[in-house]
Image: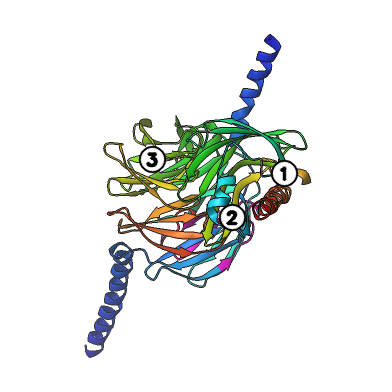
Amino acid sequence: MLKRLALAVALLSLVPAVASAHGPSRQKVTETIEINAPADKVWAIIGKFQDMGWHPTFVKTEGKGDNGPGATRKLTLASGGTIDEKLVKYDDAGKSMSYEITEVDVKVVPVTNYASTLSVKGEGDKSTVEWKAAFYRGYVNNDPPPELSDEAGVKAITGVFKTGLEALKKKVEGG
Amino acid sequence: MARARVKLKIWGLALTVPALCLTWAMTWPVAVQASEALVTNQVSDNVSFVDLTAMKATGDVKIGGKPAGIALSPDKTVAYVTAPDGQELVEVDILARSVKRRLKLGGGPLGIAAHPSKGEVYVADWYAHKISIVDVAEFKVVAEIAVGKSPSGLAVTPDGRTLVSADRDSDQVSIIDLVTRTVVASVAVGQRPFGVTISADGARAYTANVASDDVTVIDLAARQVSGTVKVGHRPYAIALSGNRAFVTDQGIGTVTIFDTTTLKTDRTIEACDHPEGIETDAAGATVYVACWGDNVLLKIDAATLGVTGRVSVGDGPRAFGKFLR
């Protein structure tokens, strides 16, 4: 018990350092996909902050606070590892939500200070989903190792976005 | 005699013309609204020039090294841009629209401010926890001042005597005497101060504290905190107009406006994705905001608080510093 408490304290003390420091320049990833379905139908799936089930990379979503301000979730990756996220803005009418990563190991996702917006815009029977991210690389100082470089961060996030959006399109258009 | 009269006439002319020019040059920027913005675009690696009257981008200059911070020379014909990835200070001739000189600084140059009259710029080094003083005539570092951890925003008082550094990872500002080039005080502020702005009378400094979602108001003479104002998520920088402060809430896409007398929040307006660099024009009538996520420069009426214009710029605009002329 004491050991666990000590570990928790040690982990807590790491949080501010992880959340504050970052590399020199913020990276940007934007991916979009057109879906042959009305925006309402797409939003009914992606607009649930507590259910990331539409994305094959994530096998479990656990969280609290529904879609309300300050809602949180923990995503478990198919490859193991978890990501803790917090909802910062939810606009049901505008079909848009913004959230941030509050805790992740750079070995799981090689980024820091990550913030993201997922939204859908419709035009009749078609819609366009846009997924945008802003983040810094995993290594917070100069001369990063390749696996924690700007390029590695951009590649990882682009991969997650593409995989998710393609799976979403298949799911919506197929069902 | 006749010759002397002519000479006198010539002298009279020679004196009258420059005097007129001087008056015109000194009053013109104050009398009319800012006419141009220079926006650093970190992703597209350039600076966009924006005609603020037409709200139209008129061109760009390639910088390289992921430009972020910007300061202008006292006559506003030269821009000094920091390139954190290239670890350089880049000097841009605004009228010729070209890069004049580049200075390798090393470390992580980010925040920058120019002296209001002397040929000096100050560059904060995010990694080496120091401020470099660059003599712009020689274009080299002439002094270095150690400050707190990860200095970010810099601002100089209008009298040119004091430099304020937001030491982000020390949760403090350093107050630096520019005559002796020494830190004379450090003042604890909110968590992770990033942008810092000094009032027109030089009495106060305001820091945008990224992690505590607030702005700290500092009395510069007393070297003490005189108040804290809650703002939106992850505030980045501050602009002042009259008794209003405009704060870019980078994390939630809004601009929070508060009264600098009462320190009460007036309004929060929807702005854009990742609003960052913000500055009021010389007339105090308009506030301009660089939107990193949306790739636009936004125009806000400082009286009605409405968004009155937007113009596309390069990718990832930051405009961290003073970017209006």
Residue A18 rendering spot, x and y as whole percentages: 63, 33
Residue displayed at 74% across by 48% down: A152
Pinpoint the chain carrying mark 2. A
The CA distance from mark 3 to mark 2 is: 42 Å
Residue displayed at 52% across by 54% down: B318
Pinpoint the chain carrying mark 1. A
Q: Is residue B108 visible?
A: no
Residue B319 rendering spot, x and y as whole percentages: 49, 55
Above or below — where is B23 with respect to B143? below
According to the picture, the residue beneath numbered tag 1 turns out to be A56
How many residues crowd around disc 3 within 10 Å: few (fewer than 14), some, or many (20 or more)?
many
Pinpoint the chain carrying mark 3. B
According to the picture, the residue beneath numbered tag 3 turns out to be B205
* Tag 2 secondary structure: strand
Q: Nearer the viewer, mark 3 or mark 1?
A: 1
Q: Amino acid at mark 1?
A: Pro
How many residues crowd around disc 1 within 10 Å: few (fewer than 14), some, or many (20 or more)?
some
Q: What range of the chain is rendered magenta?
A: B61-88
